[in-house]
Image: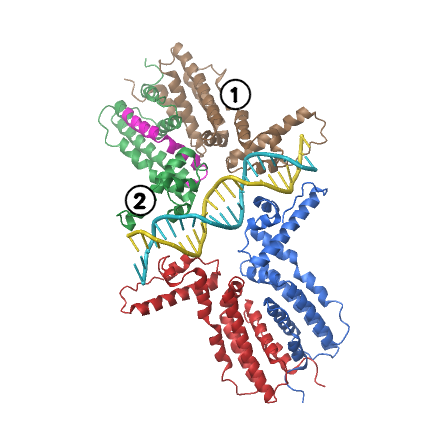
Chain colours: A red, B blue, C brown, D green, E yellow, F cyan
Amino acid sequence: MSSDLSHMGASRGRQREFRREQLLEVAARLFAQRGLEGTTTKDIAREAGVSAGLLYHYYPSKEDLLVAVVSHFDALSRLRPLLDGHLEGSASEVLMRMLRGISTFMEEHRDVMWLCMRAAGRFPTVAQALRQTREQMTELLASFFQGRIDRGEFMPHDTVRVARGLYNVLAMEHLEKAPGRSDVEPMVEALLYGLVPRT
Amino acid sequence: MSSDLSHMGASRGRQREFRREQLLEVAARLFAQRGLEGTTTKDIAREAGVSAGLLYHYYPSKEDLLVAVVSHFDALSRLRPLLDGHLEGSASEVLMRMLRGISTFMEEHRDVMWLCMRAAGRFPTVAQALRQTREQMTELLASFFQGRIDRGEFMPHDTVRVARGLYNVLAMEHLEKAPGRSDVEPMVEALLYGLVPRT
Amino acid sequence: MSSDLSHMGASRGRQREFRREQLLEVAARLFAQRGLEGTTTKDIAREAGVSAGLLYHYYPSKEDLLVAVVSHFDALSRLRPLLDGHLEGSASEVLMRMLRGISTFMEEHRDVMWLCMRAAGRFPTVAQALRQTREQMTELLASFFQGRIDRGEFMPHDTVRVARGLYNVLAMEHLEKAPGRSDVEPMVEALLYGLVPRT
Amino acid sequence: MSSDLSHMGASRGRQREFRREQLLEVAARLFAQRGLEGTTTKDIAREAGVSAGLLYHYYPSKEDLLVAVVSHFDALSRLRPLLDGHLEGSASEVLMRMLRGISTFMEEHRDVMWLCMRAAGRFPTVAQALRQTREQMTELLASFFQGRIDRGEFMPHDTVRVARGLYNVLAMEHLEKAPGRSDVEPMVEALLYGLVPRT
DNA sequence: GATGAATGAGTGTTCATTCAT
DNA sequence: AATGAATGAACACTCATTCAT
């Protein structure tokens, strides 16, 4: 909870970097737990074991800190790997695996998702980050679909819109707290084989 | 922006009712536009052309006003009719019609949806209202699915989860501002006929 | 709690008088229970079953109402009888009887005493009422002392100061809540026979 | 009325201590003069020459400030010395000296006494402080009485009740403003030698 | 007489931010 | 780099009082 960097052998630069990140992490945790307006700058400082003023040596404002938190969280680069490389297997197997990966990630970071949703309305930067993540994930999923279409495993379709739809289902389901309740498997199965009976 | 009720012929009771609703509408608009914390009680009073104190003659607190706004909006009873009665036609036609109805409604009330989402994190009542709307809409959609399954038009499936998924897609798509961008038709088509080719 | 005077046969004058007194009594009770600032004019109106505005038809302000409450309580004329007439018996017997009378009265009206004490600091009228009661009671007690001095039952002394002292002891003791704790008998006995041993 | 500590040579710690006390003293004065509800937190800040917010850097609430004022005043430790050590002389001389000491103190702090009385009704802490002071002073006086009884200078009596009575007389007399009017000497003399003639 | 809608100055308190040290 | 004292503009909410009906 407290920290004394004064006798650290670390260079000034590293110390600065360390403090920045420490404050970021504390802020991320508190913002996620209590929301943006539920967290005061003094809360963050206290929890980080520093004075109220020091925050402003590292971040010009609370809002900037929020943006930094969201940026640093960088869902994109943490989600992307979930879609890479795991391409062996049938289309449906791979799809299911990918969605489950995204699902797990979202379940673990529900509070950050809420933070972003709530903040998006006030801070265009955050809304932009959210949008970017969604669109990039959509693209990745869509390119997976396209590949499978090319291979003849999937019918041709509007890959982008279907991909975005799937991503949105996941996102919305996980904003809800109900643990384990989120189960997109039935939805995906329906999507794969269609609701309309095959003659 | 301002109003003078003093020389209205209306009776006391009607005047009270009118004021209540007027304040509610002003609050709804401002909350939706600027968010809950972006709207002060004085803003609402000023916009309604009344004094700061009068608000509290009608609503015991800002929070109560918010809850009243959300309750009064009553998405449920406005959404439900969109699913009733329009049952003639093929399953896919009817489904599409229903979803387009929900879509239009959501598009028109995007700001209220955002308000609810943002408020849900702080006020359990609002979260509950949101949940209830979703679950009831889900049930209605699911019972439509079940009916079509019974008629042999749809394959048996987990109707509730698929219905909730569809509702969530719509909701998430419409939280985004991009006008006209939301188009769930491709998704629905894929859902109906499946991505996996029919031999 | 509520009242409807509209069909009362009473004349206007009597009705007015009745309302005045009713409001006074409600106010007295609430002021005594919750203190002056702990009682709102609306509290009084509600408890009396009338509207908020009606109060001001009868009393020009909350402060005036307070003064009316204190005046109407009229401790003086309720205390005075306790000292009259009961003059038969030995000086010490009579004194003790009188003090016990005052004591009982004070115990029953502790809350009003507190109200007066608290209000005295803000409203000179109330302070004046308090002072007047004390001084008149003092005079009455003092004249009793003087009478007994004249009869040779008491030694000559500064009757007024001794009387006021006794009154003050009683008052201060009864401002405390501790029930039954107040017992001035030992003090009075000491006063009668003196602490210094009689040879 | 105003103060600038910024160029004081004093260390942070001393500055903090100074401000705390300064605010306490200003608050004590204003509370005593105008009463608790007659003094706003902004009044105190203005009078101390600081901003409205600074008060809350030092005291968590107005109520806490009040309690601090009462505690800091600490009548007990200022009254106690008046009863110590001055034990040479006849019982009546010593008693008179002690009471005069208490009297002087009370006369000088009449406004604080009023503050305490008024606040006691709302804040148990204050009532408790008042009670404690009274009871401890009572004990001290009572033990003086007991000592003199043991020496045969006083008759046996209920020392605690007589002591409390005397303390209460003093307190009540001094709540009144009339300067110099309070004179308990006649009361004490009566108490010492008794009203009933010595054969 | 009676109502209660309406007022608006004021209340204690919060908090992001600044800056001298 | 680090502190924490200091700021001051808000904020939600209260309440004695007025007045048209």
Give percent across and percent down for residue B86: 75, 69
Q: Name the amino acid type tagged 2.
A: Phe
Q: Which residue is mark 2?
A: D18
Residue in view at x 58 percent, y 84 percent: A146
Q: Which circle marks residue A184 in the picture?
A: none
Helix, strand or loop status at disc 2: helix
Q: Is B20 on the left or on the right of D5, as rendered?
A: right
Q: Which residue is mark 1?
A: C77
Q: Is B115 on the left or on the right of C178, as rendered?
A: right
In magenta stretch: residue D37: no
Tag 2 subunit: D
Give percent across and percent down for residue D163: 34, 29
Give percent across and percent down for residue D76: 32, 36
Magenta region: which residues?
D96-124
Q: Quadrant of residue B7?
A: top right
B152 shown above or below F3: below
Residue in view at x 31 percent, y 22 percent: C195
Is residue A47 in view? yes
Nearest the camera: A124 or C49?
A124
- The secondary structure that dominates the magenta segment is helix
Image quarter of the C terminus of chain A: bottom right
Q: Is B54 on the left or on the right of D75, as rendered?
A: right
Numbered disc in front, either 2 or 1: 2
In magenta stretch: residue D115: yes
Q: Is A45 on the left or on the right of C76, as rendered?
A: left
